[in-house]
Image (cartoon, coloured by chain):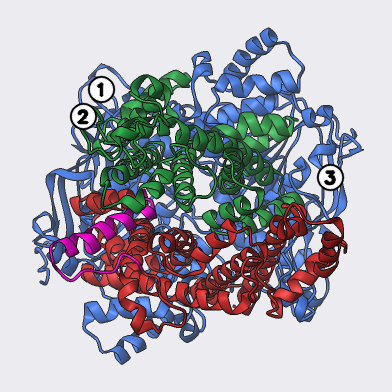
Amino acid sequence: MTTAPKSPSIALDVAPSWWRRLSLLLRELYSKPISALGTTITLLFLLAAIFGPLIAPYGENEIIPSEARQPPSSEHWFGTDNLGRDVFSRVILGAREILVLSGLGTLFAVICGTLFGLLTGYRGGWFDEITMRTFDSLLALPALLLALLLLGTVGNSQYSVLIVIIIVYTPIVARVVRSVVLTVKPKGFVEAARLGGETQMYILIHEILPSVWPALSVESALRFSYAIFLVGSLGFLGVGVQPPSPNWGLMVKEARPFASLIPWALFFPAAAISLVVIGVNLLADGMKRILGTTRTSQSRS
Amino acid sequence: MSRYILRRIFFLLLTVLLTSLLVFIVTQWLPGDVCRIILGREAGQGAIETCRQDLGLNQSLPVQYLTWLGDFLTGDWGVSFSTGLPIYPVVMDRLRNSLMLALVALVISIPLAVTLGVVAGLNEHKPIDSTINVGSLAVVGLPEFVTGLVLIQIFSFGLRDLGLPSLPANSSIPPGTSFMEALPMLILPALTAMLVLLAYIARLTRAGVVEELKQPYVRTADLKGLPRRTVTIKHVLRNALLPTITVIAISLGWLISGLVVIENVFNYPGLGRLMIFAIDRRDLPLLQAVTMVTVLGFALANLGADVLYGILNPRIRLGE
Amino acid sequence: MTVIDSGDGTILDIKNLTVAYQQAGEWLEAVREVSLRIQGGETYGLVGESGSGKTSLVLAVMRYLEETGSIRSGEIHLGDLDLLALDDNQLRQVWGKQITLVPQNPQSALNPSLQVGDQLIETLRHNLNLSQEEAERQAVEWLKTVRLPDPGRVAAQYPHQISGGMQQRVMIAMALCTDPQLLILDEPTTDLDVTTQAVILDLIRDLTQEQNTGILYVTHNLGVVAQVCDRVAVMYASELVEDAATQELFSKPLHPYTQGLIDSIPRMGDTKDNIQLRAITGQIPPIGEAPSGCVFRTRCPVAVDICLTRPPLYPAGESRYSRCHRWSDIDQGEISAHQPTPAAIPEPIKPDSGQHPDLKVKELTVHFPLLRSISDWASNRPSSEVRAVNGISFELSPGHTLGLVGESGSGKTTIARTIMGLEEKLSGSIELLEIPLPDKLSRRDLDTLRLLQMVFQNPEEALNPHHTIAETLRRPLIRLSGLSDSEAESRMVELLQAVRLPASYAGRLPGQLSGGEIQRVAIARALASNPELIILDEPVSSLDVSVQATILNLVGELQADLGTSLMFISHDLAIVGYLADQIGVIYLGSLMEITGPDDLFQSPHHPYTEALLSAIPLADPSRKGEPIHLGGEIPNPVDLPSGCPFHTRCPRYLGEICATQAPPWQVAEETGKQIFCHIPLAELSASQENMIAERSKLSN
């Protein structure tokens, strides 16, 4: 018994092309101020990551000792740090470093998580039981703790940070994907495909995956924002990426002893990381509203 | 009900067992030769062999794991590589400090967060809801080291510069400080941790309230003619607040992660700082102990939440 | 605030009510200029299919529309109280005291974390200002009034601990305990089994007979209306199209839609061999898309030019109304939307019965093990299992239709899924064309899969929402029938034609199709591989009545054309009786009776079949059936009763023997029907004569 007419949703439109879906999504995102803000912030940081070297007036480790500890000016927009490096350049160039590292990590984690989620959810049985129990125990360790444990033993490098992100986020993504698969699997169209003699591969990719996309894209955005968060926090703790990398967290750590002397060297990287995480978060929240999915993880960092 | 609790306990044991295996693999097996790490690169073959003998590294991996687990369970946590002191008392002291901090943060944030979430949920799509929603999204996105530094800037340096009584920016307390003595030192770190929890718990509480308000039994209660207040308090919140127990349990995971950063911002001698210390020195036994204690605490808190949830929820209490 | 009777006994007076929902800046009318009056003591039926606006009307009367909805114009008076003038606080004075509601789904309407008794006590205390002790006493009294066994115990239970039928009784107690002036029943039995429905309907009738309460009974089920209501209003596409006393409405409907609606229900005794169902063509327009002029004209068989202008609600005799320009022509019998009774579906070519059966199921048993918990293991309890299907045997001859009928939890769907390979059996055998079928789907080769296809119950989940209809249909053609891409393309169009859908639908997504259209595509998909046997699992149960008939006719015709064997599963005895050549009645995973459709009105019957037959509400107000009430609840299939599975609820329970020994299969001589019962057939026959005679009148 229907009461009110349902509001139209993108998912039920005439099979649109990917490009059209993306532009529809963008238009929806820009229809509300909050998600528009999130999208704009995210896009700006992405631009900085892509064109950073063209924008930055100085190199990331270009030291001008004579100009150390300068307050913001027209020459040095964000001032200079203790060693005489241009904070603006480091913040801009740091965007690429942090976004690439968290982006790649998220991408691999999403791929692995989707794979595990699809297989465990669809096959069930012992494979599911063992995989999910292992993932549960990985998740019983708070994310940062797991990251520290791994970094503490495999050593500090960008690659270990990358691996850590993948290991930490794969179970989270897998859980989200699995929960969607579990709701789709008993539906008539999936059983009809099984009765049609379709292979498991075909069913997973053609019948089930399309229903996973909405939850998966929101989760990917969320994971991306928390991956940035995690890389920044690791940088601040001095674990993982090492100096002189322009990791914003590391920059905050390095500027801290001189906080009262050169507050700008502390403020701008801190603001940058906060801004980008909040931006991507708002974007994910907007996507959640538009794609109408409630199935997202609840874990941070 | 007893079935439910037994199930929970079983899963707790399983999880802790699997996690301990993971910790063992990561700390004992991944890094390669522990003796090489202890004795350094210049150590002679003979010394290394003796060390391996002492640590039982020549035994098979399963035996090593079981020995290690047994030692841990009996409180024999070994000696720190870096300080040469027994680990157990140090970790216990730090655990006490971390718990004090966590407790203060939880006690302030839970009632506040639940209230904010309920207010937002009951006013869905109204300005107050949007404000709480955007505000919490922003706070969730702020890394703890940023919030911590901002708070220090305001309440420590800012107040001091204005010549007002200020809060300490450095919370390093000596071992064995009593709770009351430590309290002033706890305020800023607890406030930082609280902000994170606040946003998280409030968001999920709001979601729960919004979800419950859509349930048909709310209509039944309305149509009984009950005043809106009664409907909200007796019917909606009774169901909406139950899952909050689980939410708070999950948020402990956040709190633990957050505390690691916060303790390092404020130089607070808790488990989190001890962990970074252990990583810096590659002090593997210490790292193991800290991780295992944290995992165990987190798992026990989750078990407690599950049991409480089961007791309060008639569908579980009186379920099959 | 008390309501003073407005003098002429009118309890509810709705005048020209228009309700609309705002969507994308536009107002879509869900209820358009509806007027109706309910007198004290009257039961007023509001009938309509989904999307007709009846739910919106009810919510408007209760002033409980959702935020996007609003009352655009009109008046609603309860006695002399203007309901539209009340603010929220005043409304809460009316709710619960003067207007109460029994909703469709009692499970979700009760608060899951409050004891049933407390929820009733709360109503009593708040509305009647009783003390706690007095409210407690009355609550138990009311639970007794709604015939709940052991009311004291039920009061202390939580909703999840009692069955749906019991929950609905609690809701009824809650709605009646304040002696309201207006009671609204919104599809109160739709989610219940037919035997439970019979009990609830009787209860409602008995409890409201003596009172002066006005009742608005909302339903899509004409049988229920005929049995319960004094007056009926029929809604279609937001408008009230006919309003008449129940007796008159059923004997002489004066609106083509009402005529079509009454015609499209299969009656007990109709079979595809003697009659084709008369369906209304087309489908209900979605809200806001009704045609201009007469809303029914696009589907009306007697529409003419004048129907392009909107008809008023014509008075068509004493206190009856029809919104049809041509009502007097219909009244005088000059035109009729009753189509001439169409010829029966042509008898399919059914090979001689001497041939081997298509499908042979022997002693099929399916159990689902329950997870053995640690406490079970600790206390050394054996692992338990749900005994879904327990030793069922039947055969299906080529080109025939086997109907399986049973209530929820009977195991009928499990049988279907096990044959299809979607569940695994515990024991027994399933042979398709004399060849044993492997249990696991993965062990069946493409040729076997090709022979067996299935149509699922829920149209919302039947098709992949992300694939076009063409993609959905092409796939089995290529994969199972081995056609090339171009062959598949042309065959796909043929399939759409076969299920009476235009070829232009190929490019659409399922979200753009109605439920009935989706089920047609699902049937086309099942036909794509040219199977030997198709299993249809409740294919029409979630469709509207007028659409149901179209699908049932389609299935009958397709079978006559193609000679496919069918297994048709339903909870509705009339539907199964219409389509099947042989009917199996299932209870708790066991067959109770196997009968031909013509013999449904021939005693003897198994006592369970007898109860089922008697419980179906007749769509004929002149004959009130006397349903047999089954006591108790359906036993838990984890703890099956010993002996005859039906003995715990059997009204003809003999004694010991039923509880200890499995009954024999008795075969009736004249009809050949098989009955699984201890009672001698002659004895069953004699005692069932009356009920059967009463019921079978309808078949003529």
A185 or C521, which lies in front? A185
Magenta segment boundaries in residue numbering: B141-170
Give the percent coordinates (x, y) of residue C223.
45, 51
Q: List the residue tagged with mark 3.
A: C439
Task: Give whichever of discs 3 and 1 has the lower sequence position.
Answer: 1
Q: CA distance from mark 3 to mark 1?
A: 58 Å
Can I make out residue C27 in this image? yes
The lab-note entry on whether marks 3 and 1 share a chain reads yes
Q: Which chain is green?
A: A
Q: Which chain is red?
A: B
Give the percent coordinates (x, y) of residue A114.
61, 39
Of badges 3 and 2, nearer the viewer stands 3
- The tint of chain C in the picture is blue
B85 or C267, which lies in front? B85
Q: List the residue tagged with mark 2.
A: C311
Q: In the displayed structure, does residue B165 sit left or right of residue B238?
A: left
Tell me the chain of label 3.
Answer: C
Tell me the chain of label 2.
Answer: C
Give the percent coordinates (x, y) of residue C52.
33, 40
Task: Name the quadrant of the N terminus of chain C.
Answer: bottom left
Task: Give the residue type that dot 3 points to.
Answer: Asp
Of badges 3 and 1, nearer the viewer stands 3
Tell me the chain of label 1.
Answer: C
In reply to whether residue B169 is colored magenta, the answer given is yes
Crowding near the residue tagged with mark 2, few <14, some 14–19, many ≥20 C-alpha atoms within 10 Å: some
Q: List the residue tagged with mark 1.
A: C307
